[in-house]
Amino acid sequence: MRKQTMNRDWIATARTLSEALPYLQRYSGAVVVVKFGGNAMGDDDAMAEFARDIVLMRQVGMNPVVVHGGGPMINEMLSKLGIESKFVRGKRVTDKATVEVVEMILSGLVNKRIVQAINDQGGRAVGISGKDDDLMVCEADDPELGFVGRPVEMNVQVIRDLYNAGIIPVIAPVATGMADNETFNVNGDTAAGAIAGALQADRLLLLTDVAGVKNKDGEVLTEMTSEQVRALIADGTIAGGMIPKTETALDAIEKGVRGVVILDGRAPNAALLELYTEHGAGSLIRG
């Protein structure tokens, strides 16, 4: 009985690998930017699984670029320091004291934890921030938000240098200002979209805590055009926190990204399912 079960498992595994082959060939050499965030970041098992997936992408010839957030960790540290967190339209109000904490947590604690997780799985990862080599230069997004930046200049050669050397870049969304070398906090999705656009990435994967973009009946929409997304925003179907994610997707596509996928990062092997299976694992948005 055990042998029969094992044989069935081997057959299923072989079939899966066979079905994945066209997609392995399709994405060989492709640049895929992965935004990692949400609750999965705080779970050791989920972090290890994410790291394994990223290492596998690299080992089969893809060029993954990881951009991460870290909101829950920032909130925790601000609370410990007695600094109140304020949000306007879903974005963190970032004064001078807050931006110092943001940089410490994102560039330090979170970034190096992801780097270590990838290295533990046999990959080669290097952590940088948007300040390194002036990767991401920003201006203030909104005076009401303080030191929250909007990328206006992208210098992505450092990323290309890393992945061309077989190294997985892990990028913290902290950036340099246009004047006086200020430090800016950049929304993680915004940073990932700007980086994907500057790299002319094949795919941008936005890992979040929901299954994807849903219609009015609560069903996940597996594929949409930019025009359809704009219509869903206009009629209120896309609302709340999904608006900035879909706007990031639209902006990235306008800058030359071939497709953007919004998917549930809590689901096992979500990125691999999206890239290497016919049915995918989220909502694909294309021009």
Image (cartoon, helix red, strand yellow):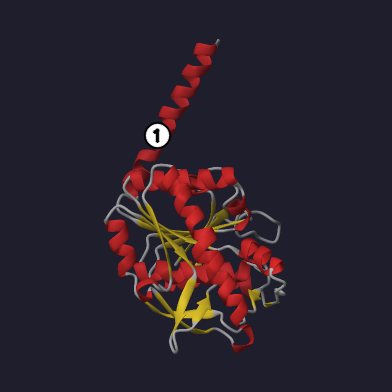
* SS state under label 1: helix
Foreground of the two, 190 or 135: 135
Q: Position of residue 5 (x, y in %)?
A: 53, 17
Crowd around label 1: few <14 · some 14–19 · many ≥20 (10 Å): some
Residue 116 in the figure: left or right of residue 28: right
Quadrant in the picture for residue 146: bottom right
Q: Position of residue 99 (x, y in %)?
A: 57, 76
Q: What's the residue type where badge 1 is placed?
A: Leu
Residue at point 53%, 74% (across, down): 186
Quarter in which the N terminus is drawn: top right
Picture layout, residue 56 above or below residue 145: above
Is any part of residue 150 visible from this angle? yes
Total marks in image: 1
Quadrant in the picture for residue 66: bottom left
Quarter in which the C terminus is drawn: bottom left
Can you identify the residue that label 1 sits on?
A: 17
Residue at point 38%, 73% (across, down): 135
Foreground of the two, 202 or 269: 269
Is any part of residue 229 visible from this angle? no
Residue 32 in the figure: left or right of residue 215: left
Picture layout, residue 10 above or below residue 116: above
Q: Position of residue 40 (x, y in %)?
A: 60, 51
Picture layout, residue 141 above or below residue 267: below
Q: Position of residue 49 (x, y in %)?
A: 52, 43
Quadrant in the picture for residue 263: bottom right
Residue at point 60%, 89% (across, down): 143
